[in-house]
Image (cartoon, grey):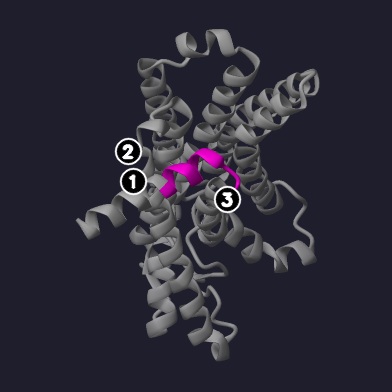
Amino acid sequence: MSDGIYLPTEIHSEQINNRTNQTIITNFILLGFGDHPELQVLLFLSFLAIYMLTVAGNIIIIVLVVADLHLHTPMYFFLGNLSCLEICYTSTILPRLLFSLLTGDRTISVRGCIVQYFFCGSLAATECYLLAVMSYDRYLAICRPLKYTHLMNGRICFWLLAISWMSGLLNISIITSLLSELLFCGPNEIEHFFCDIAPLFKLSCSSTHLVELINFIFASIVTLPPFLLTLISYVCIIINILQMKIKASRQKAFSTCSSHLTVVILFYGSLICVYLLPQTNTLKKLHKTFSLFYTVFTPMLNPLIYSLRNREVKAALSRTASKIVNMAHS
């Protein structure tokens, strides 16, 4: 225009030209634990041992739940599915981390990073719902024992499980589809050992306001209702246990839910430290450590917690081991 006034179409075309002049990056660098090169071998061996323990421990839980008739109850049905989820969850993170520690190659494609976030996010969201379902199951078993069989039959268990998985996948699918539309122009270094969404927002050269808003809304839907349901369930459970007059009944009731409560505290405690607490300098330094708890250590500890603190699982393990020994000798 001769008078120097630009029309909206001219402004739009100028923005496009500016964007195309920028270099669009196609790879990220996951810095992970690269700031400790002298510890790479030790870290590799440690994470390899953790991964093997996680997979083996959760497979044992799944096998026990499937093979032992005494564990064919809603509680152990959900526990078996939790173990399956934990194997998938840790397998989206640790193999890639082990590869980078072994080879020194810390690069990951932008598309691969978004795919990793999708699986991590959807599985974490599903775990939030599944832990809430398990707490509701314990509430019905302890506080409504006469109605438990009717309210937690096989069909209801299946639908609760299906809704947990579908809700987790749907929420993260919407966020991931918006995330895949963002452009990344550099820098390309992620100060983490896996692709979390917050670093991706910081590295994007596109406007992220809408995606961040939608992510906040869906993150609230994924975490707050399951957390509140879990909290309310355990408040009711504890009140009910304290009202029991027989000490043996109190101990039995508490033993059936103490394992799950321990897992809930570990999982939500680490999530709160990573995503909800103010990001002070001290917490920023501990960010990767807290992330390790809910992504690596909790999946490994779950089988140990449920086997060491649960008499029925220990009894099922003993019975299954005896059957294997008898079959080996016959």
Q: Which residue is pictured at 58% across the width and 33% down the height?
A: 217
Label drawn at residue 66:
2
Instruction: Please state if 112 lies on the left or on the right of 199 as rendered.
Output: left
How many C-alpha atoms fall within 10 Å of the one at disc 3: few (<14), some, or many (≥20)? few
Q: Secondary structure at mark 1?
A: helix
In the picture of the structure, the residue carrying the numbered disc 1 is 63
Classify 321 as above or below 265: below
Residue 221 appears anywhere in the view: yes
Check residue 308 in the rendering and tell me which mark sits there, or answer none. Answer: 3
Q: Is residue 202 above or below residue 227?
A: below
Q: Which residues are magenta?
A: 308-318
> Is residue 225 rendered to the left or right of residue 185?
right
Label 1: few (<14), some or many (≥20) within 10 Å? few
Q: Name the kind of residue labelled 2 in the image.
A: Val
**Amino acid type, mark 3:** Leu
Locate residue 278 relative to residue 5 in the image: left or right.
Answer: right
The reply to whether dot 3 and dot 1 touch (C-beta < 8 Å) is no
> At 37% across and 75% down in the image, what residue appears?
99
